[in-house]
Image (cartoon, rainbow, N blue to C red):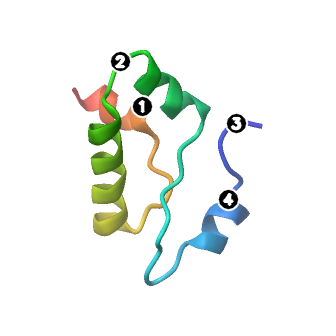
Amino acid sequence: MDGFGDDAILSISGKEPRIILMDGEDLVFILNGTISLHDAIKAKVDKLVKDGNTFYKLKHLLHKL
């Protein structure tokens, strides 16, 4: 299984989610230097605030660059 199941994501989402999710692929991007931890967390928090998305995959951000 890759990432998180939809049920898991929905169970922690809501009007005021207080968590962001990161999977192994996101971690690889950080550890190999493709994106800094700071920029990864910023992108995930920005997406959470804007769209309520607790599980924004970093590959979507990297495709935009």
State how far apart marks 1 and 3 are (Cα): 14 Å
Q: 10 Å neighbourhood of mark 1: few (<14), some, or many (≥20)?
A: few
Residue under the point 46% across and 72% down: 18
Q: Name the residue under label 3.
A: 2
| Image quarter of residue 59 | top left
From this viewpoint, which residue is outermost toward the left? 65
Badge 1 is on which residue?
A: 59
Residue at (60, 71) in percent of width and height: 12
Circle 4 sits on which residue? 6
Mark 4: amino acid: Asp
Regarding mark 4 in the picture, which secondary structure is present there?
helix
Residues at marks 3 and 2, CA–CA distance in whole angstroms? 21 Å
Q: Which of marks 1 and 2 is in front?
A: 2
Of the residues under marks 4 and 2, which one precedes in the sequence?
Answer: 4
Q: Label 2: which residue?
A: 33
Looking at the image, residue 8 sits to the left or right of residue 63; the answer is: right
